Amino acid sequence: AQSVAQPEDQVNVAEGNPLTVKCTYSVSGNPYLFWYVQYPNRGLQFLLKYITGDNLVKGSYGFEAEFNKSQTSFHLKKPSALVSDSALYFCAVRDSGTGANNLFFGTGTRLTVIP
Amino acid sequence: EAGVTQFPSHSVIEKGQTVTLRCDPISGHDNLYWYRRVMGKEIKFLLHFVKESKQDESGMPNNRFLAERTGGTYSTLKVQPAELEDSGVYFCASSQEFIGQLNSPLHFGNGTRLTVT
């Protein structure tokens, strides 16, 4: 069965420090991995995706994520956090093994960047 | 381009009443998805339309939920009768990907927050 785990409900980081939001997944085939961000009273916005190729993918707003097949992880990172990065972050996966189009999401991680 | 729009943004109803949520996808997007997030939980897939046809409705929780997409444009999701556990945020998303092309991101609306009291 497909699943996504975001082990941290809350991540706090000081402005200017590097941030990491963790994500691990489980699929039967090859994973298509996504990160979305939700700002207050807004919908989910696409940040970045991993489909194939280079394990380090770069996305919007200076975010990047590293695909690690052996650890089945896709952690979101940013070298220097901004207060405006404070939001709810969701990791999601599509399972190429099933052919299904639907995304499986994690429970979300609330990131708070402290000025 | 206009994004995915959802109406209403909030709805508060009593148990046993009926509520209809609406989603207008991005123009030209054949694929339309409904998802739901119950407080503090993961965002769960409900169903997927390709144009007016239901491609996958495996996530629909029970027969109190009815989704339609007449004409392949906007979609409605009706809950009748509503129960307390139906409370949550209902998201709609659309994409222009073709079937079998799984690497396109979805474009989400702002969601409808449904509260059943």
Image: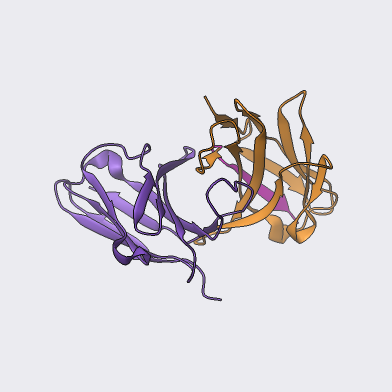
Chain colours: A orange, B purple
B86 and B80: which is toward the camera: B80
B117 and A58: which is toward the camera: A58
Residue at far left of view: B16
Give the residue displayed 58% in from the left and 32% down from the top: A4
Q: Is residue B110 above or below residue B116?
A: below
Tell me which segment is drawn in magenta.
A106-115
Q: Residue A114 colored magenta?
A: yes
When asked about the image quadrant of residue A59, the answer is bottom right
B86 and A33: which is toward the camera: A33
Q: Can you give x and y, in whole percent of width and height, for residue B107 in the image?
A: 54, 59
Q: Can you give x and y, in whole percent of width and height, for residue A73 in the image?
A: 72, 31
When asked about the image quadrant of residue A33, the answer is top right
Q: Residue A98 colored magenta?
A: no
Q: Is residue A42 left or right of residue B105?
A: left
Give the residue displayed 75% in from the left and 45% down from the top: A13
Give the residue displayed 29% in from the left and 39% down from the top: B85
Instruction: Specify the quadrant that holds the C terminus of chain A.
Output: bottom right
Residue at far bottom of view: B1
